[in-house]
Amino acid sequence: MPHYDHYVIIGNGPAGNHTAAILRENDGDAKITIISDENIFFYYKPKLTEYIAGGLTKAELMVPGLSFYREKKIRLRLGQKVDKIDPERKIVFLNHMEKIYYTKLVIASGSGARVLPSMRSYADCLKHITTYNQVMEYKEQIQTAGEFFIFGGDLVGFKFIKMLCKMHKQVTLLIYPNAFWPFNLTEKMQEIIVKNLSRQGADVLVNDDISQIIKKEDTYIVKTVKGVEQQVDLVFSFNGLIPSVEFAKGCGLDIDHGILVNETMQTNVPDIYACGSCAQIYNPKINSYTTSIGWANAVVQGKVTAMNLLGTHRVIESVDYKYFDLEGVEIKTTWWEDIEESSFI
Amino acid sequence: MKDIDLVIEICGSAGEGTISAGEILSRFMSGQGFEIMSFDSYPAEIRGFGKCVAHTRLSSNCIYSPGKLVDVLISLNDGHSISQLSTLKKGGILVYDSAPLKPHGEDKSVLGWAEPGTVTYGVPLTMLANRAAGNSRGRNMVALGAVVALFHMDGQSFTQSIQARYAKKKQVIIDANVNSFLEGFNWTKKHIEKTDSISFDGVIMPAGREKLIINGNQLVVRAALDANLKFYAGYPITPATKIMEILSKELPKNGGTLLQTEDEIAAIGAVIGAGFGGVRAMTATSGPGFALMTEFTGLSVMAEVPAVIINSQRGGPSTGIPTKTEQSDFNAAVLGGTGDCPRIVLAPIDTFSCYQATVLGLYLAEKYQTLVVILLDFFLSNSIRNIDIPVKPSQVFLDSNIAPTKAELENYQRYKVTPNGISPRAIPGTPGGIFFSTGLEHDEFGKPDYSDKGHLKMTQKRFDKHSFVLEEAPAPQISDFTGDMADIGVISWGSSAGAAQEAVMLARKDGIDAVSFSSMILSPFPEKALVAFADKCKKILVPELNYSGQFANFAVHIIKRPVERLNYITGRPMASEDILEKMRQM
């Protein structure tokens, strides 16, 4: 009796899709399933800020390749949430009580917005830009709103601020130095950033913290420790990302922030791999695990995962050092890639 | 006011209350002032398994067809609903049971097959039904509660609709249904984050005239009783059984008699016997039964005895597909049987015209002393509409027999040749009105006559009579031409006519200069009107629900030019979307 693999990929981002593409190229018989809790086709997540500001159409947000899934017989299960994994029986349990049997599992579930512990009580007041559905909820509000309060300061946040300034919105940014993970913001860097953002029209607050956020009808009153009080239409939090791996906890997988994998993207559990921003990859040079972000990294990791699944030994190598311009501060990194270099399926 | 035009399907297994839920939804929407068209599809087997679908289109405007694609699919059964997903519109809404008793096996969950972009709402139907009534029977009501909450319908009025639906049941059953509905309603309001744009908020339909919520079979019965039907003989067969079932209760109350015969041959024999005796009589059947009745239909024409057969078509030939709709008995109805046998054939084009066709059929059969076949189909028989209450027929339609005068009775010729072919008919027992009656060819007195001249004369008489029927038949429905010539003319009949009319309206919005033609009377056919219509159309399209294009072949013979054909035998009613698509390709 012929035996066909069933590759189940959790995640519909660049890592998951590139894993699927390579698997299909090299294994025509296998069953391939992609599962995602987002009910939307593969899209450029880094372009959400442009989309939210009205600079892109929905079609431009999407990664071309809709027909790819049909032609390549890749089953897309969108809008379907994974509840848990049973590695012993090789079953993925979906939230709607369906069981999916796999022979090889790839976890490429990406990451979600990080909410600072001190801000959890204000979670209902905070907005993030990490998924399409979140964006759709307040896309129209952004167009009509006049005043914004933003705290944190990760890459997406800076992009968003620049766009709001271009749209002539009133923006106040409270910089949180620890939002700049994976590097620390120095005083000097902060000075340059403040100068550049102020030139663009944003009010920048530093060395302060939020003491209270009060919802008042359709607006929010933000109070800081140093006594600043502002009434704004929307409050955004940009404090980095955390891997979306809740469903994988307790099944025997080694998890720190993300799922721990070796240089071949393999987890500690046989036949389960992880890649993209949900994975923490072992780096022998520093003898530790690091998390990567960025589209290009995810693509490379997806490809390496697929090759290893197919039995071709490949070791992940981080992409070359790049210099990233963060509001005038040049940052040297191996992880941050410009999305324009994204590859297409 | 914003327009509402929605197609909602409830899909479940037989015995899960799928059809009841659809009926309650339809009645509620009708009560709110919306136009409704709904029909059910169910398995041929009596109960216990098989897929059931309750399909409802509701609109704030006129409805002509049931709608092919679905805006909202409510799944009461994952296994059956998976195949039903193909009818869901892109970006449509799926409501499913998010907490079934047992986990689904791989690929056995309807959500697992939902197309990307489908708006999905998981509601714990089984769990809430159990909570409401201690068992899962109320899942259908929980689902209705969820839909009412999701789309911001009037929950209180809906509760009253449920109470009305089960008013004759025990209080415990009413309570179980209402409680299940409220569980679904309240749970959805609390837990579901709405992401679709359908909302009945602020939609208030103007109070209109009182409507009758009824299907074609029920309307046939109503019409028959209103038109003085006094005898019915029949043998049960889907989809016509309901006519007999209702008449078995109602006909005796109206001074009539119902006879369940051993088969369809006996039924038509009894109907012809009753007709001979001067009583308005009819039978109802479907394809297989109609085939048997052919044994007797020639007698009705030859002996000039009134008889009415309702043939509700289903998938054929033979036993075929009992619970699916088709229009494949056209040839059998218009041309079937032996000899030169002119008969009247009527085909209602919508639910309302089932009433008109039945009244007219009984009238014409009696007046023209002949066979009348009324072609319904599964869809017309079972689809429910809310219509204006029909006006009862005038006295003229209640007694149309042309009786002989005293002078005519002196030397009574039962089959006398007259200018319009109608011979005065003496009802047995009429003094001086004794006559021969036989299936053999006969002379004007009714005595057998096998001569060539006699046969020609009497055949001619029967055909002449037949041609006069057109003078009393309703004129074809022809949409207005916008210029001298239309690009496309759509010729349709029976239940496909509504979809054709709607397709023409949609095509015009698309910039296609299209017109439509449909005739309730198929035999004799208004040939002159059809030729005049076709002459003003550059291209002709004939959509119908049979494989071989039976009506198209018939029309080609009349207009003497080729036509485009659109033939479906999917078991589903004709869809305006398909006709429109075909027009775009022409």
Image: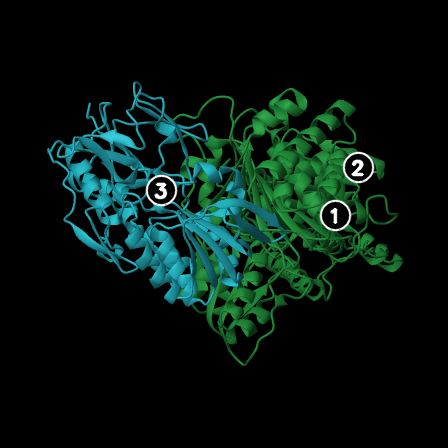
Regarding residue B445, the answer to whether it shows in the image is yes
Q: Position of residue B226 (x, y in %)?
A: 80, 48
> Which colouring convention does the figure follow?
by chain
| Amino acid residing under circle 1 | Gly
The quadrant in which residue B403 appears is: bottom right
Q: Quarter holding the N terminus of chain A?
A: top left
Circles 2 and 3: CB distance less than 8 Å? no
Left or right, A111 with reference to B142: left
Structural distance between the alpha carbons of marks 1 and 3: 52 Å
Instruction: Say whether mark 1 and mark 2 are on the same chain.
Output: yes
| N-term-proximal mark, 2 vs 1 | 1
Q: Which residue is mark 1?
A: B31
Q: Position of residue B419 (x, y in %)?
A: 72, 67
| Amino acid residing under circle 2 | Glu
Chain A representation colour: cyan
**Label number found at residue B250:** 2
Please, which chain is the residue tagged with disc 2 on? B
Q: Which residue is mark 3?
A: A241
Regarding residue B247, the answer to whether it shows in the image is no
Residue at x 71%, y 43% (from the top left corner):
B218
Left or right, A283 with reference to A189: left
Chain B representation colour: green
Frontmost residue, B320 versus A304: A304
Circles 1 and 3: CB distance less than 8 Å? no
